[in-house]
Image (tube, rainbow, N blue to C red):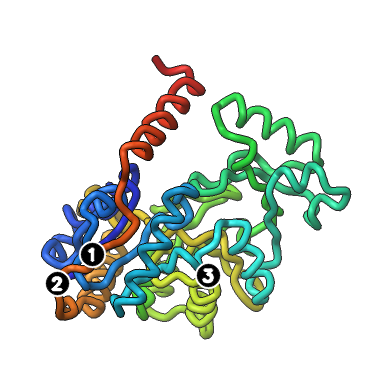
Amino acid sequence: MIRFLATRAYLDPIRAFLDSFGQPLVDTLVPVTYEDLRREGRTPRCLHVFSDVDRLRPRTRAVVCSLADQLESAGVPFWNDPRRAGNRVELSRRWVGAGLNDFRVAPLAIVRAAADHGGLRPPWFLRVDGDHQGGRSEPCEDLDGLLRAAHKLRRRGKDAASMIVVEWRDARDDTGRVIKHGVFRIGDRLVQRHRFAGTRWMLKVSEITDVPDVLEREWAWFQNPPAGEMDLVRKAFDVAGIEFGRIDYVPRPGGIRVWEINTNPNLFLRYELTEESTRTRVHQRSAAGVVEAFRAADAPPLEGAPLELEGVGVGAAERLAVVGERIARMVRKGLP
């Protein structure tokens, strides 16, 4: 048994996977929200996967870190130690320090206030820490453009405190395309997911899916990635302290450029099962690798009664605080 822990708002990715390619794992992977686990107050002595570690609010993170303490003390295995995983700014600092990345990230507040802009140089663009929507602005050539973009984001309900600035790098190859790679890590195993191709600087999906050379290069990458590339991918996961997630990166001369690691990624969706997809063989090969990796990680629970969790129950005061936060967000968004 493997307990897959996620926030309530983002339980759909693992459920969608178990409804499609992941059906062989329905008796292995057990999705559980952090909220439900806290109400239960106990958990089996099996492998736990902490997902959404970059989305945890401070109050929840403290409780989840306490859970990790208790699992560790009881000898219960888990992936994605929430005490070690950092936010996007911290992970960027680690990757730069490890020689993986050549761009820096800093909170908007620091870039705006510091005389040296926190060491960052334009062009730069905005992201929102903890979300996975990619760039929230076009690359800006100066601070004024960045602040105008931040103002637009604030008008759309985004908190300025959550905004971060990312140095922009031109990721196009010699054909003018951006080639974005995605690789899952599942325990000790790396499973290739995609090799998107497009002409825009930010890719969320592959824009070029019907060009034979693009499809064949993706398939060739699945069969035989360039020497050393997977070693760099593993290093990026190790530096981040993440055993489960999907890394998004682009190749660069002599290495890779890591965009992010998503600890609760979309694994596979129903539409990818259709025979009409030009990338069906890619989906099938990757899905088989994911299933095999989870099966390899599965093990019988440790002997003993379920682990009683201390200090993780949700009291009435905290439930009221959560409700209050939700109401406040609705008011800020202008909802009835």
Question: From the viewer's perspective, is residue 45 above or below residue 53?
Answer: below
Residue 325: mark in rendering: none
For the point 67% across and 52% down, which residue is it? 166
Say which residue label 2 marks: 305
Q: Which of marks 3 and 2 is in front?
A: 2
Question: How far is disc 3 from disc 2 in space, using C-alphas?
Answer: 33 Å
Local packing at callout 2 (Cα closer than 10 Å; few below 14, some 14-19, many 20+) is few
Q: Residue 255 location in percent, x, y?
A: 62, 75
For the point 70% across and 59% down, which residue is it? 104
Question: How far is disc 1 from disc 3 in space, using C-alphas?
Answer: 29 Å
Residue 240: mark in rendering: 3
Indicate the quadrant where residue 167 lies. bottom right
Quarter of the figure that contains the C terminus = top left
Local packing at callout 3 (Cα closer than 10 Å; few below 14, some 14-19, many 20+) is many
Residue type at mark 1 is Glu
Q: Residue 176 location in percent, x, y?
A: 62, 56
Question: From the viewer's perspective, is residue 65 above or below residue 154?
Answer: below
Residue 148 visible in the shown view: yes
Which one is in front, 203 or 65? 65
Q: Which of marks 1 and 3 is in front?
A: 1
Q: Earlier in the sequence, mark 3 or mark 2?
A: 3
Residue type at mark 2 is Ala
| Pointer 2 with pointer 1, Cβ within 8 A | yes
Which one is in front, 185 or 109? 109
Q: Which of marks 1 and 3 is nearer the N terminus?
A: 3
Say which residue label 1 marks: 308
Q: Residue 57 location in percent, x, y?
A: 47, 47
